[in-house]
Image (cartoon, rainbow, N blue to C red):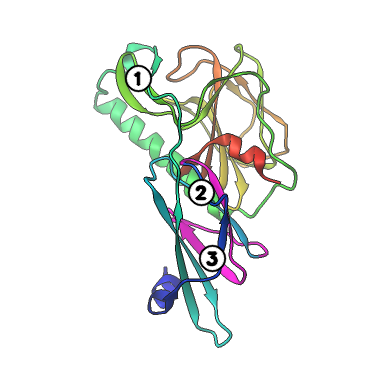
Amino acid sequence: MMLWLLAGAALCVQDFTWQPATPRQGTLIVVSAPGAITGQVAGEPLHFRDGKALAAIPLTTSDSIRVQTLSIRWDGAVIGHSAFVPVAERKVPVNEQVRADDRYTAAPDSALEARIDAERVLSRDAARRAHMVPRLWSQPFIRPRSARITSLFGSGRQVNGVWRTRHYGLDIAGPKGAPVRVANRGVVALVGHFFYGGISVYVHHGDGLMTVYHHLSRALVAVGDTVERGQLIGKVGATGRVTGPHLHWGAQYGTVSFDPTELLKLP
């Protein structure tokens, strides 16, 4: 925070770029800014390596988003740089119909509401801690299952006829007990049985990236475990708010969710 305050009086436009030039909502971009030491997009810090850093575009972004970077000038002055990235709309189904147990659409009582709030705190804490982990992967990301995709990231959802939210993950088909493998090397950040997510595993991969695996029938790892790319970490289930057995695969950059298939494009 102090660096941003110091840079406030020296804000200018730097010769930095990003790819893709016009990203869609809910995707990753690569920010190239030679000499940058840090930055932020959507309130999330950027981790520069050799002048490049990943950033995530929130699904709720309208038509543009601000990218900010910081660099240190030859005389020691902290210089801030800023640009606006144009953002394209994500075109996905907007009226997906989902049937689940009625308890997932009824108003929660005080005890259940307290449980849901506590679980959200745990999830957000894991997301924030993702920025504290150095990069742990060196190979490309893989899908946790090779089965068909049954629901896209970003689609609009009605649960039992009631509008709920956009879908912040990718649903992958699978029978109960089918293997779920971690998308890349990382450290297990959180394991629990959540009201909405069911039995879930959260994995930090470093530099702000985290993947999430919901609705498992069983978790096969514990918090603090180092997991290798493709390692079995759980089994497909139907726990939490579901219509039947499947895997919900999520991806986040800090607290910002993005389409998990974006990970498959990383080198």
Mark drawn on residue 38: 3
Q: Quadrant of the N terminus?
A: bottom left
Residue 224 image position (x, y, % from top left): 62, 42
Looking at marks 3 and 2 on the same chain, the residue that comes earlier in the sequence is marked by 2
Quarter of the view holding residue 159: top left
Residue 256 image position (x, y, % from top left): 46, 44
- Identified at 38% across, 79% down, the residue is 9
**SS of the residue under disc 2:** loop
Answer whether residue 246 is magenta in the image. no
Answer whether residue 29 is magenta in the image. yes
The residue range painted magenta reads 25-50
Residue extending furthest toward the right: 139
Q: How many other residues sit within 10 Å of disc 3, few (<14), some (14-19) or many (≥20)? A: many
User: How many numbered marks are there?
Assistant: 3
Distance between mark 3 and mark 2 Cα atoms: 22 Å
Q: How many other residues sit within 10 Å of disc 2, few (<14), some (14-19) or many (≥20)? A: some
- Identified at 73% across, 38% down, the residue is 228
Q: Are marks 1 and 3 in contact (CB under 8 Å)?
A: no
Question: Of circles 3 and 2, which is in front?
Answer: 2
- Identified at 40% across, 34% down, the residue is 119
Residue wearing tag 1:
158
Residue extending furthest toward the bottom: 75
Residue 36 image position (x, y, % from top left): 57, 69
Residue wearing tag 2:
22
Looking at marks 1 and 3 on the same chain, the residue that comes earlier in the sequence is marked by 3
- Identity, as a three-letter code, of the amino acid under mark 3: Thr
Observer-nearest residue: 112 or 120? Answer: 120
Q: How many other residues sit within 10 Å of disc 1, few (<14), some (14-19) or many (≥20)? A: some
**SS of the residue under disc 3:** strand
- Identity, as a three-letter code, of the amino acid under mark 1: Gln
